[in-house]
Structures are given as structure tokens and as C-alpha cells.
């Protein structure tokens, strides 16, 4: 039987001049997202050598609840607040294999 559980790994690279703004806005997402139905884990990381790079490690009960998360008002507010401040934003949908 296939697992429904979904892991998301998101890499966010802030423009050097905007790293504090991006970090602040990412931190706002943590508490709000952790309280969402279907969220198992939502952890924000900052690169030790390059403080412009952030990694969000997320676990969700399934893809549908993650997609609902992506349509929340706090994600929309994040996107508006960081418009033009992010150099790179990549999202990987992962499945644990062991």
C-alpha cells in the first residue's frame, strides 16, 4: 500500500539586501502553519555558511492538505510581503521510502 504522507523540502534564497525581511516573513509562517489541520512538521532552517539561504522541511498527512496550506491567507501574505526579495524558490515533493 502506497503512503499518502508527503514531505516538502523548500529552498528559499533571499537577495542579500532582503535576507532579514525574508527571514522575518518565513518565521511568521511557522506558528500559523504548525496549527493547520494535517500538518505534522514544519521546520525552518538557515544555512550556516550563507545566511541568505533558508530551507523549510515540512511533513503533511497527504498532498491535499499541503495544497490547502498553499492557498491559505498567510501564504498569500508571505508572497506579497516578499515580492521581489527572493532570488530562488524551489519546492520538492518527496516520499519517504524507508
Image: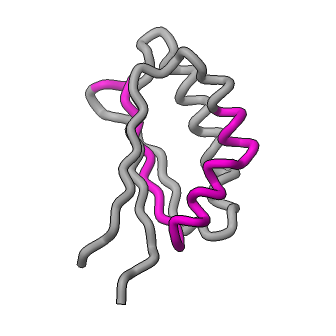
Q: Residue at x 68, y 68 (%)?
A: 37
Q: Residue at x 41, y 62 (%)?
A: 7
65 over 5 or under it: above or below = above
Residue sitting at the far right: 73
Residue sitting at the far top: 17
User: Where is residue 88 drawn, in percent x and y?
Assistant: 39, 26
Q: Residue at x 59, y 39 (%)?
A: 27
Locate the C terminus by quadrant. Answer: bottom left
Q: Which residues are magenta?
A: 50-78
Residue sitting at the far bottom: 1
Q: Residue at x 55, y 15 (%)?
A: 84
87 over 94 or under it: above or below = above
Report the front residue among 48 and 90.
90
Residue 61 in the figure: left or right of residue 88:
right
User: Where is residue 55 drawn, in percent x and y?
Assistant: 40, 42
19 over 31 or under it: above or below = above
Residue 9 in the figure: left or right of residue 17:
left
Locate the N terminus by quadrant. Answer: bottom left
Is 57 covered by the magenta stretch? yes
User: Where is residue 60 drawn, in percent x and y?
Assistant: 52, 66
Count every numbered label the image shows and give the total. 0
Residue 55 in the figure: left or right of residue 69:
left
The image's colouring method is one colour
Is 90 covered by the magenta stretch? no
User: Where is residue 73 drawn, in percent x and y?
Assistant: 75, 43
Which corner quadrant of the image does residue 94 belong to?
bottom left
Amino acid at each position: 500500500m502506497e503512503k499518502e504522507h508527503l514531505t516538502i523540502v523548500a529552498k528559499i534564497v533571499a537577495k542579500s539586501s532582503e535576507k532579514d525581511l525574508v527571514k522575518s516573513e518565513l518565521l511568521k509562517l511557522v506558528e500559523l502553519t504548525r496549527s493547520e489541520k494535517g500538518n505534522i512538521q514544519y521546520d525552518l532552517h538557515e544555512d550556516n555558511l550563507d545566511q541568505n539561504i533558508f530551507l523549510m522541511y515540512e511533513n503533511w498527512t497527504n498532498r491535499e492538505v499541503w495544497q490547502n496550506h498553499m492557498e491559505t491567507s498567510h501564504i498569500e501574505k508571505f508572497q506579497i510581503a516578499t515580492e521581489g526579495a527572493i532570488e530562488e524558490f524551489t519546492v520538492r515533493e518527496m516520499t519517504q521510502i524507508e
